[in-house]
Amino acid sequence: MPFINYNTLPHLKLRDGIHGGLYHSDQLTFGHLVLEEGALLPEHHHVNEQWTHVIEGSLEFTLDGETQVMTPGISVYIPANTPHSAKALTLCKLIDAFLPVREDFKLLEPWVGQ
């Protein structure tokens, strides 16, 4: 399927306050994510390299001990196995890409909006 409409793709729940549409190719996981204001992503790391790009909102992001407030037009590259965390200072809309595929994301439960 070469065309994916993230406007109609059902959202999956990544954790409380974080949800979005995800699509997996053979090599990559790509997603449009929403972080509700105040949502926390605790420090973690994974074998996947990751790119995060802010489309809307203000996101406090910590990468390997360095913190920056990200706003629309700012991206961060997270190398594999690098500790990172985030806090949504406002409602945020992000694009995330992971290489290789996030197999754990394939098991996520559907998000039920409030």
Image (spheres, grey):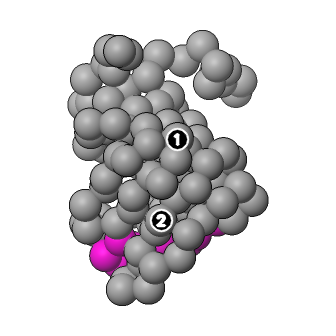
Task: Report if residue 14 is visible in the image.
Answer: yes
Amino acid type of disc 2?
A: Glu
Instruction: Work out how far the residue at label 2 is from the one at label 1, CA to CA, in angstroms.
Output: 12 Å
In this view, the residue farthest toward the right is 73
Q: Is residue 113 left or right of residue 104?
A: right
**Mark 1, secondary structure of its residue:** loop
Foreground pick, 6 / 42: 42
Residue 79, located in which quarter of the rendered image? Answer: bottom left
Q: Is residue 86 magenta?
A: no
Magenta residue span: 75-84
Give percent across and percent down for residue 54.
63, 53
State the mark number for residue 60.
2
What residue is drawn where x is 71% and y is 24%? 3
What residue is drawn where x is 37% and y is 16%? 113
What residue is drawn where x is 39% and y is 61%? 86
Whether 70 is drawn above or below 55: the answer is below
Give percent across and percent down for residue 73.
75, 59
* Label 2 CA crowd tier, 10 Å (few <14, some 14–19, many 20+): some
Q: Which residue is mark 1?
A: 91
Residue 32, located in which quarter of the rendered image? Answer: top right
Task: Report if residue 100 is visible in the image.
Answer: no
Q: Earlier in the sequence, mark 2 or mark 1?
A: 2
Give percent across and percent down for residue 69.
56, 69
Which quarter of the rendering shows the N terminus? Answer: top right
Amino acid type of disc 1?
A: Leu
Foreground pick, 28 / 61: 61
Foreground pick, 35 / 48: 35
Whether 18 is drawn above or below 9: the answer is below
